[in-house]
Amino acid sequence: MSGADPKNAAKAIDALRRGWAVAVKGNSATIGLVAIETCSEVAGASGILLSASRAATLKLANQFAAADTALPVLIARPADLDMSLALAIADPALDLRYPMKGPFAAAALPDADAAKAAMEMAREAGLLPAFLVVDPVLADAHTTPADVAAFQDAGQLRIAARARLPVSASSDAELIAYRSAADAADHVALVVGKRDSSTPVVRLHSECLTGDVLGSLKCDCGPQLHEALHQIAGAGWGVLLYLRQEGRGIGLVNKLRAYALQDQGFDTVDANTRLGFAVDARDFAVAAQMLRLLAVDQVRLLTNNPEKVAGLEAEGVAVLERLPLKIAANPHNAGYLETKRDRTGHKL
């Protein structure tokens, strides 16, 4: 990816979190953007850039790119635009409070690649994928789609530190922390037991503050984490990869927004898509790179999710066996577990 600099994307993502303007230079045009969630005023905005799924919820059609319904949608600035309306357009959790929005006029995207890169930056920043379009001259940071792709490249991981860490499942464990040149997230691996020539039992566990730390009953993450550690310890040795990809990759704040939508009656799949994100935005290539840095190239994978098997194998890690992880349901997460089974292919 010649000329790409992930540091530019990192600076732009940080700028979006702070409510500053960024310029995304595509092949045919440069788009100036401010994240609606973090900006403080709408002066100077010429339009609004939305994710395809959020636009679909608002009954908008991508009239100028109908052949690609996954493209973001640009709408002209509404005459009555203020911050309240901008937030109501951006946040589906406000749809019941502000049901009457529009009509909106769709406009041609100046550059499709730049618009798609903006959506990826929103996800990396943990922000709603909705932007005010502003003059690029005002930008505090500059990036390109190639920069964003380089930022997301898992190949930049390195082991930063390691130390012995006895845990309740096993007193013989080592915690290994990873860093990358671009991403501030620190992924970690817990190697449990004494390594030998056998194929390790491996668990890919995505960070879940609400479940892992606070004991949330809305998901099965906390019980899965502890059961996985005990199964790894019982197998002799293995690795738990703790991936900093909260909320299936959309971040803690957006996960809480998804919870609010679930309280309105949407399941976990529809909640994510109404927010403007993929059903599952996690990157399992990161896990493969973590394993490679531990010289692990084949595993017995502890998971109910076939996507994890496919994700590792696509990156060259052989999954010799899939081991199911059985967790009892409770009244608060029974529907969530059914959705994972019926809509995202999870199985025991």
Image (cartoon, helix red, strand yellow):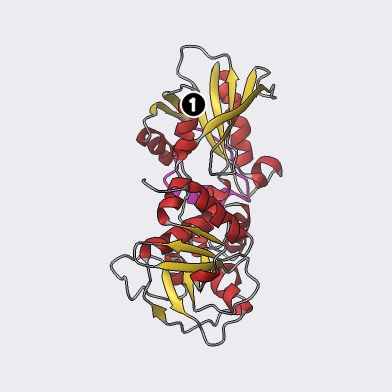
Residue 342 visible? The answer is: yes
Q: Is residue 218 magenta?
A: no
Q: Residue at x 63, y 22 (%)?
A: 174
- The x, y position of residue 165, in whole percent, is 68, 23
Q: Residue at x 60, y 64 (%)?
A: 20
Disc 1 crowd rating (10 Å Cα; few below 14, some 14-19, many 20+) is: some
Q: Residue furthest top?
A: 197
The amino acid on which the numbered mark 1 sits, given as a three-letter code, is Leu
Bounds of the magenta span?
Answer: 323-348
Residue holding disc 1 = 293
Please tell me whether residue 6 is drawn above or below residue 99 in the rendered image. above
Front residue of 258 and 140: 140
- Image position of 250 (left or right of 107): right
Q: Residue at x 49, y 21 (%)?
A: 200
- The x, y position of residue 305, in whole percent, is 45, 40
Q: Secondary structure at mark 1?
A: helix
- The x, y position of residue 296, in whole percent, is 45, 22
